[in-house]
Every structure is written in C-alpha cells, then in structure tokens.
Amino acid sequence: MAFKSGFVSIVGRPNVGKSTLLNKFTGEKIAIMSDKPQTTRNSIRAIDTGDDYQIIYIDTPGIHKPKTKLGDYMVNIAKDSLNEVDLVLFLVEVTDTEPGPGDLFIIEQLKKVRTPVFCLINKIDLVEKDLILPAISAYKELMDFSQIIPISALEDESVEIVKKEIKKILPEGPKYFPEDMITDQPEKVIAAELIREKILELLSDEVPHGVGVEVIMFRKREDKDILDIQANIYCEKGSHKGIVIGKSGKMLKSIGSLSRIEIERLFGTKVFLELWVKVKPDWRNNEFMLKMLGYNK
C-alpha cells in the first residue's frame, strides 16, 4: 500500500474547539486549551504518523478582526496557512442557530483558495439531533465544501471518522518527520504555552490576553534528572501584575504549581520552575516585544 502524507490546516472562529480537535487527532496535548477566545497565538504543527500515512495538522489562531499588531499577526498566520496545505478543516459550532458574521468572513476567505475544504460542524453532543440537519443545510448553501461532517471534537469515534476521510484525500508522499515526533514546536515554546494556559484558566477575561510568556532558560541538569525552567510573564498594566502575583504571591504560586505539573507530564521528568512577572506597557503593539516572544511574521 502506498504511503500517504500531507498538511492539514484547522481554521475557524476563536474558541470553536480547534485546539481540542488537534490534541484529539494526535492523542497528545500539543495545543493549549481554554474556554477563552484567541487562546492560540501561533501556528502549531502536530504530527500523526501511522503505518501508511503521516498527517501534519496545523492549528491556526482563530480568524477575527484584529485590534492590535499581535492580532494582525494571528490573523495573517491563519490566512497564510490556507494556501500552503493539502486540506483545510473549517470548524464551526452546531450550537449557533445560524452562521454568524465570523463564520461568513472565513467562508469568504476559503472561497479564494483552491485547497479542498471539509466543514466540520462541532459540538453535536451539546444539542438535540433535530438541529444537526438544519445546520448542515445552512452551510451547504454558503459554499461547495468537499465534505460536511457533524462531529464532537471530544469523542474518539467522531475524530476517527474525520481522519478516515482525510486519508482518502491525501496525496502519496514521503514521511516528512520521524515517526516518534509529535510536534515541531521548540520545547521552550511548548513550556511557555503551557504556562500561558494556566494563566488563562486561573485569571479573569481582561488580564490573560494582555499577558505574554517568555522562557528565558530551559536546561536539563547534568547531575540529576531535573529540568530547570525560568520564565518571564509580561503584563501590559501594573494592576495586572498585581492580579497575576495575587495576595501574598498565592496566584503566581498556583500558576507555577499547575504549570509545573503539566510540563512534567509532557516531558516526563521533574521540573524546577521559576516565574517572574514584569510590566511592559502595550507590548502587543511593540514590534520588538512581539519578535522576542516569537510573534515575528
């Protein structure tokens, strides 16, 4: 049997379940997940290799109307990925009564590319079955999708159905990455994203999107099986710094403790994690800061 391989981009509005789907495809936590929109800031590549296939999934930032240079970067990343892949997975929510402005905007972008597009109608586990067919009909009228598949990104059966259809459309090709490799993200970036995930989980809506994380040291000790990680957490306002640190440093301690557990699980080793909180006003519009944090498109 011929070996098939290719690149698959996952696009959609912020917070429709793209990172959840990506992690389900690979069986590993590659992308951070949160119930807050615009969680993903970079284009994340996850690698799923089988006996006769290799699928490289690209989890893009949610496409939205940007308000900052960081927002511009995120949207450009998502749009650029559409022309560089073998297949696009357009993720929407069945819980919406009808396609909203955000979905319609993305559909207009998808119409401009020649790449095949699957429309995945997500979160079918949250609605009555009689709402699924109207949702399929609504999206069918908007664009000639290669496939429209109702799914729950939380359920293995749904994910396997999608993966089976992806394999059908992939071209014959080489094994781009070693079979034991699950992501091409640098380890420092993964650690920074896991720390940012815990900030998103623990803090209110206003603070997290004004927060950036930079891992300044990522080093394995020579004499012990311990990973030393030091990271800066950047806030845009002094008041946000106080919230991140918390009373008597309790919030920062919680962020560090939960981050350490997640990093240890992923890297399979003990971790010594040190965090510092710094104020960088309006960093999301600062070109130097964006490049320093890896947002350099």
Image (cartoon, rainbow, N blue to C red):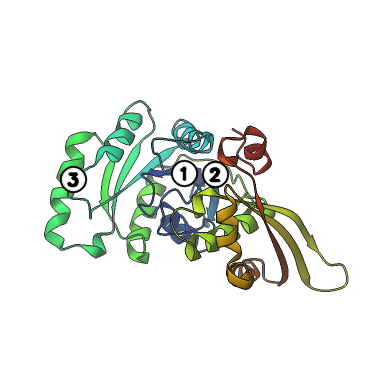
Q: Which mark is residue 61?
A: 1
Q: Do callouts 1 and 2 mark residues in contact (Cβ within 8 Å)?
A: yes
In the picture, measured across the screen, residue 150 lies left or right of residue 193, that is: left
Q: Residue at x 35, y 53 (%)?
A: 162
> Which image quadrant: the C terminus?
top right
Front residue of 68 and 186: 68
Above or below, 61 relative to 105:
below
Q: CA distance from mark 3 to mark 2?
A: 29 Å
Q: In the image, 24: left or right of 69? A: left
Tell me the distance, in whole angstroms, between the alpha carbons under discs 3 and 1: 22 Å
> In the drawing, does residue 113 fall left or right of residue 196?
left
Place of residue 109 in the rendered image (x, y in percent of width and height, measured from the top left): 35, 30
> What is the number of the mark on residue 42?
2
Camera-nearest residue between 59 and 255 = 255
Identify the amino acid type marked 2. Answer: Asn
Real-space CA distance between mark 1 and mark 2, rounded to the nearest whole angstrom = 6 Å
As shown in the figure, which amino acid type bears the numbered disc 1? Pro
Q: Secondary structure at mark 1?
A: loop
User: Which residue is found at the position 77% from the left and 65% from the top?
Assistant: 228
The answer, for residue 120, to whether it is visible in the render is yes
Q: Going 52% across and 45% down the picture, which residue do you hit?
A: 41
